[in-house]
């Protein structure tokens, strides 16, 4: 007699992305970009808030970090987060795409850089590269 093995559904884990962005319209663009990607999006409106979220949650898979934010810059927040949780990829997003800005982002512990205005397809491509 053959036993039937019940199929257990595989649980799909949605990646969680922390978006550190003080500008509402930029955040909405990023949020809309990921609606079809099945990602969970969390927002921090400044660098200090981003650090607090990383400290309080262990489910952050990736961070999109704006450079110029109130309270604490994206550079400074990235440095602190990189020390706390070096396994989390941090992607800087900024209108300031000079080579010195990109170098400063790398020195702060960031793994990639995307220039504003953000191209949604490029953003998805860069993020997915680090989530896989």
Image: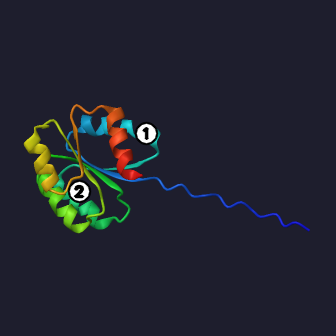
Q: Mark 2 — residue?
A: 50
> Outermost residue, left direction?
100
Q: Is residue 10 left or right of residue 103?
A: right
Q: Is 17 drawn above or below residue 98 in the view shown?
A: below
Q: Is residue 40 left or right of residue 54?
A: right
Q: Is 52 drawn above or below residue 62 in the view shown?
A: below
Q: Residues within 10 Å of mark 2 (few under 14, many from 20)?
A: many
Residue at image point 46% right, 53% down = 14
Q: Mark 1 — residue?
A: 35
Residue at image point 13% right, 53% down = 75
Q: Which colour scheme is used?
A: rainbow
Q: In this view, does 117 lie to the left or right of 98?
A: right
State the SS at label 2: helix
Residue at image point 21% right, 57% down = 49
Front-most of residues 13 and 51: 13
Location of residue 7 by image quarter: bottom right
Q: Position of residue 73 (x, y in %)?
A: 12, 51
Residue at image point 30% right, 31% down = 119
């Amino acid at each position: 007699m053959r036993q039937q093995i019940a199929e257990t559904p595989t649980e799909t884990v949605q990646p969680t992305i922390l978006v550190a962005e003080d500008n509402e319209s930029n955040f909405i663009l990023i949020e809309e970009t990921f609606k079809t990607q099945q990602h969970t999006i969390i927002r921090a409106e400044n660098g200090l808030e981003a650090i607090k979220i990383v400290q309080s949650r262990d489910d952050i898979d990736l961070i999109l970090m704006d450079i110029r934010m109130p309270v604490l810059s994206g550079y400074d927040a990235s440095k602190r987060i990189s020390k706390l949780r070096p396994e989390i990829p941090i992607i800087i997003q900024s209108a300031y795409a000079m080579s010195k800005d990109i170098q400063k982002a790398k020195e702060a512990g960031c793994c990639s850089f995307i220039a504003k205005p953000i191209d949604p397809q490029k953003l998805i491509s860069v993020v997915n590269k680090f989530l896989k």
